[in-house]
Image (cartoon, coloured by chain):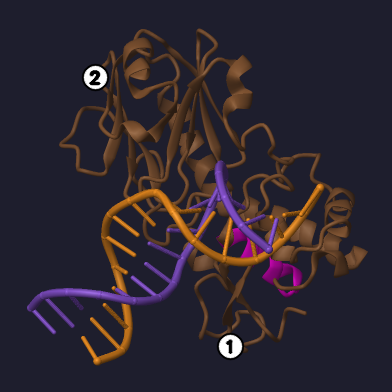
Chain colours: A brown, B orange, C purple
DNA sequence: AGCAGGACCTGATGGC
DNA sequence: TGCCATCAGGTCCTGC
């Protein structure tokens, strides 16, 4: 489940190796993964282009080419973007291969086949569903307590569903939503509009804190996540509630509970969170 | 308008 | 041991 910290870790890994590389051959083995343009068109027209920069917006990874086009990748839940200095034996879950002129390879790997790729000119950015409607980056100046309060005030949904809404804030997924709510002492099923200004302020701070820490530890690996070099993330041992139901709360010792909120498995401490 | 729930996928897990 | 049902999660789509 690559969320912001995982995608950011992949981004920084790719930034170290990809800029300056020229695409030699594109090999699409699962055409449905390519949403824009067609898989055949990507294979035909991407070769010859040179990577310029790697950026991230929410959970979307963006590989910019010197010609101005952008390869946008969303890993959904089990997707990986893996860099190899040389070709390998590719398993059945490797769906797209970008071979570079120096022999190195960027591989898109996804067990669940939910991940998606788009190759567009900047003018066609708006055709990538979900990308242009993203809310502010949580670690940017646009994500303030005032902004979060305004969003919460006018919605009827739970605070957890609000945090998961990418149009409200970009990049939070199930892990970090649960972790941020625990740190802020707020129950996930509370109506968003019921939170007071002090609670909103604590939550905004917790979101930033947990994301910064998770980026520092290179993300969370539960099972599938790997960074661009195949390495697991190190934040799992710092999780306080996510997938810790039945275990003791690190804060108060009470038992962590699991429920469903907004259709998602949700973990919280009934003693610390109100 | 805005939210809840199903669909998309496959592998891991648990019950019988 | 094997089979089946269930669960996991991000986002789009449908329906209320």
Helix, strand or loop for disc 2? loop
Tell me the magenta residue range: A175-187
Task: Check whether the beta carbons of the residues at disc 1 and disc 2 lie within 8 A of each other.
Answer: no
Q: Mark 1 or mark 2, which has the lower sequence index?
A: 2
Image x and y of residue A146, in percent: 90, 51
Helix, strand or loop for disc 1? loop
Taking A248 as reference, is A158 above or below it?
above
Based on the picture, tell me whether residue A182 belongs to the magenta stretch: yes
Res A195 seen here: no
Q: Residues within 10 Å of mark 1 (few under 14, many from 20)?
A: some
What residue is pinned by disc 2? A103
Quadrant in the rendering for residue A156: bottom right
Q: Residue at x 83, y 52 (%)?
A: A151
Observer-nearest residue: A273 or A252? A273
Quadrant in the rendering for residue A129: top right
Image x and y of residue B4, in percent: 65, 66
Disc 1 from disc 2: Cα separation: 52 Å
Quadrant in the rendering for residue A115: top left
Q: Residue at x 39, y 22 (%)?
A: A38
Q: Residue at x 22, y 27 (%)?
A: A86
Magenta part, dominant SS: helix
Based on the picture, tell me whether residue A207 belongs to the magenta stretch: no
Observer-nearest residue: A50 or A72? A72
Image x and y of residue A148, in percent: 83, 53
Q: Residue at x 45, y 43 (%)?
A: A75
What residue is pinned by disc 1? A255
Residues indicated by labels 1 and 2 sit on the same polypeptide chain: yes
State left or right for residue A231 relative to residue A176. left
Taking A262 as reference, is A37 above or below it?
above
Q: Quadrant of the C terminus of chain A?
A: bottom right
Res A74 seen here: yes
Q: Residues within 10 Å of mark 2 (few under 14, many from 20)?
A: few
């Amino acid at each position: 489940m690559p969320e912001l910290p995982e995608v950011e870790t992949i981004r920084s890994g790719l930034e170290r190796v990809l800029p300056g590389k020229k695409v030699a051959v594109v090999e699409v083995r699962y055409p449905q993964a390519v949403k824009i343009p067609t898989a055949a068109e990507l294979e035909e027209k991407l070769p010859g282009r040179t990577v310029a920069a790697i950026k991230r917006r929410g959970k979307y990874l963006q590989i910019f080419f010197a010609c101005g086009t952008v390869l946008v990748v969303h890993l959904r839940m089990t997707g990986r973007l893996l860099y190899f200095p040389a070709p390998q034996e590719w398993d059945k879950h490797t769906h797209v291969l970008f071979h570079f002129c120096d022999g190195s390879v960027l591989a898109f790997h996804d067990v669940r086949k939910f991940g998606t790729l788009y190759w567009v000119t900047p003018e066609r950015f708006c055709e990538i569903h979900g990308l242009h409607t993203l809310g502010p980056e949580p670690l940017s100046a646009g994500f303030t307590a005032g902004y979060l309060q305004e969003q919460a005030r006018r919605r009827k949904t739970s605070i957890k569903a609000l945090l998961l809404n990418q149009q409200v804030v970009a990049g939070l997924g199930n892990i970090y939503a649960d972790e941020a709510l625990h740190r802020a002492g707020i129950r996930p099923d509370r109506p968003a509009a019921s939170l007071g200004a002090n609670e909103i302020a604590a939550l905004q701070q917790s979101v930033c804190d947990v994301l910064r820490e998770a980026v520092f530890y290179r993300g969370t690996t539960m099972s599938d996540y790997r960074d661009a070099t195949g390495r697991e993330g190190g934040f799992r041992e710092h999780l306080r509630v996510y997938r810790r139901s039945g275990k003791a709360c690190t804060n108060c010792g009470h038992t962590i509970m699991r429920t469903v909120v907004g259709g998602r498995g949700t973990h919280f401490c009934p003693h610390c969170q109100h």
